[in-house]
Amino acid sequence: MAPIPASPPAHPDDDPGSYVGLDDRDAEHRARSRGWTTVRAVPPGSIITLEYVAGRINFEVRDHTVIRCWLG
């Protein structure tokens, strides 16, 4: 059995607010280039799971534009 890590892996040092207003494709490219392992884009009002996943960044996207961004 694998050992339990002492702490969750750190996410990239990045400002989620810097993605708001970007085209969703540009935002995804930027996020991946900065080290995010999972990028999730959802339309406004979507029902999504709320568990925290280290290394994931979330975008709320309307008309191909990021309108909100959060971690986990």
Image (tube, rainbow, N blue to C red):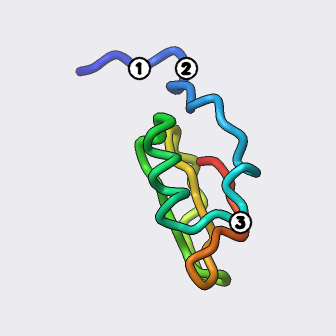
Q: Which mark is residue 4?
A: 1
Circle 2: residue type = Ser
- The answer to whether 64 is drawn above or below residue 54 in the figure is below
- The answer to whether 68 is drawn above or below residue 52 in the figure is below
Q: Secondary structure at mark 2?
A: loop
Q: Earlier in the sequence, mark 3 or mark 1?
A: 1
Residues at marks 3 and 1 touching, judged by CB atoms closer than 8 Å: no
Circle 1: residue type = Ile
Sort mark 2 into few (<14), some (14-19) or many (20+) by Cα contacts within 10 Å.
Answer: few
Q: Which mark is residue 28?
A: none
Q: Of residues 24 and 1, which is closer to you in this image?
A: 24
Q: Residue at x 45, y 39 (%)?
A: 33
Q: Which mark is residue 7?
A: 2
Residue that numbered label 3 is attached to: 21
Q: Residue at x 45, y 18 (%)?
A: 5
Which residue extends farthest left? 1
Return the x and y of residue 27 as percentages of the image width and height: 55, 57
Q: Secondary structure at mark 1?
A: loop
